């Protein structure tokens, strides 16, 4: 697995430090708001587990799973494969995402959430790849862990063909690994 990584883009230590920083800000923002922390599966699982442990105020955890019905392309048309289980009407929702790439999935998630009439929706994404943003997408995350260049990354929850999610850092995949 490690041999397929061209270079480490963000180390475990950097991720840890940034999550602690964001955790402080998020805990401040959500004091007395009892937010629903929504994870968009499955890329977010590793980030989610680390992030919620730095949220020091009461909150509830929930998940949803999106699926693109044009296969694995990140900007395909989306459907909700598994919806949330908490009723978020009138609640404050914090969305956690692994990466904001073309923006298609986060926008879809946002629209889907808004139809449930929450009190507020904020977004925290571990990674942001602004160069890839689809024209017309204006949604801005409230917290961005790291802004990264336009390269395909894996690890810390992010996959290529469902692999590499368990790497503890974010790395760039060698081109040979794509072509396998
Ligand atoms: P979107 O293009 O912003 O809709 O991103 C959709 C999804 O594509 C993300 O939630 C990731 O699961 C996946 N994705 C986008 N860029 C990368 C990448 O560099 N590595 C791995 N997965 C990615
Ligand atoms: Mg994802």
Image: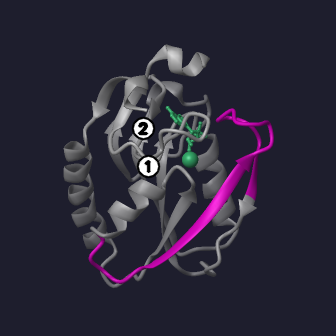
Q: Residue at 41% of width from left, 80% of height from top?
A: 59
Note whether 74 is above or below 28 in the view shown.
Answer: above
The image quarter in which residue 134 lies: top right
Q: Position of residue 84 (x, y in %)?
A: 64, 71
Quadrant containing the C terminus is top right
Q: Position of residue 50 (x, y in %)?
A: 33, 61
Q: Is residue 59 magenta?
A: yes
Q: Earlier in the sequence, mark 2 or mark 1?
A: 2
Quadrant containing the N terminus is top left
Q: Which residue is mark 1?
A: 141
Q: Do callouts 2 and 1 mark residues in contact (Cβ within 8 Å)?
A: yes
Residue closer to the observer: 16 or 165: 165
The alpha-carbon separation of the residues under discs 2 and 1 comes to 9 Å
Residue closer to the observer: 38 or 41: 41
Q: Is residue 22 left or right of residue 74?
A: left
Note whether 58 is above or below 124 in the view shown.
Answer: below
Q: Is residue 36 left or right of residue 83?
A: left
Callout 2 crowding tier (Cα within 10 Å): few <14, some 14–19, many ≥20: many
Q: Residue at 61% of width from left, 80% of height from top?
A: 86
Residue most extreme to the right: 69
Callout 1 crowding tier (Cα within 10 Å): few <14, some 14–19, many ≥20: some
Q: Secondary structure at mark 2?
A: strand
Q: Which mark is residue 129?
A: none
Regarding residue 149, the answer to whether it shows in the image is no
Colouring convention used in this rendered image of the protein: one colour
Q: Which mark is residue 128?
A: 2
Q: For the residues carrying marks 2 and 1, which lies nearer the camera in this image?
A: 2
Q: Residue at 45% of width from left, 23% of height from top?
A: 151
Q: Is residue 15 magenta?
A: no
Q: Position of residue 33 (x, y in %)?
A: 39, 81
Residue closer to the observer: 27 or 6: 6
Residue span colored magenta: 55-80
């Amino acid at each position: 697995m490690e041999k397929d990584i061209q270079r480490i883009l963000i180390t475990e230590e950097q991720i840890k430090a940034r999550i602690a920083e964001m955790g402080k800000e998020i805990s401040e923002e959500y004091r007395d708001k009892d937010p629903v922390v929504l994870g968009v599966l499955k890329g977010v699982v590793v980030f989610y587990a680390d992030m919620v442990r730095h949220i020091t105020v009461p909150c509830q955890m929930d998940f949803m799973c999106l699926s693109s019905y044009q296969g694995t392309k990140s900007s395909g048309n989306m459907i909700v494969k598994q919806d949330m289980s908490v009723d978020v009407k009138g609640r404050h929702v914090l969305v956690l995402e692994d990466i904001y790439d073309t923006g298609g999935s986060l926008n879809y998630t946002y629209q889907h959430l808004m139809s449930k009439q929450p009190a507020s929706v904020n977004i925290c994404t571990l990674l942001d790849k602004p160069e890839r943003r689809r024209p017309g997408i204006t949604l801005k995350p409230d917290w961005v862990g790291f802004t990264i260049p336009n390269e395909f990354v894996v690890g810390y929850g992010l996959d290529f063909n469902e692999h590499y999610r368990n790497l503890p850092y974010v790395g760039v995949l060698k081109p040979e690994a794509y072509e396998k």
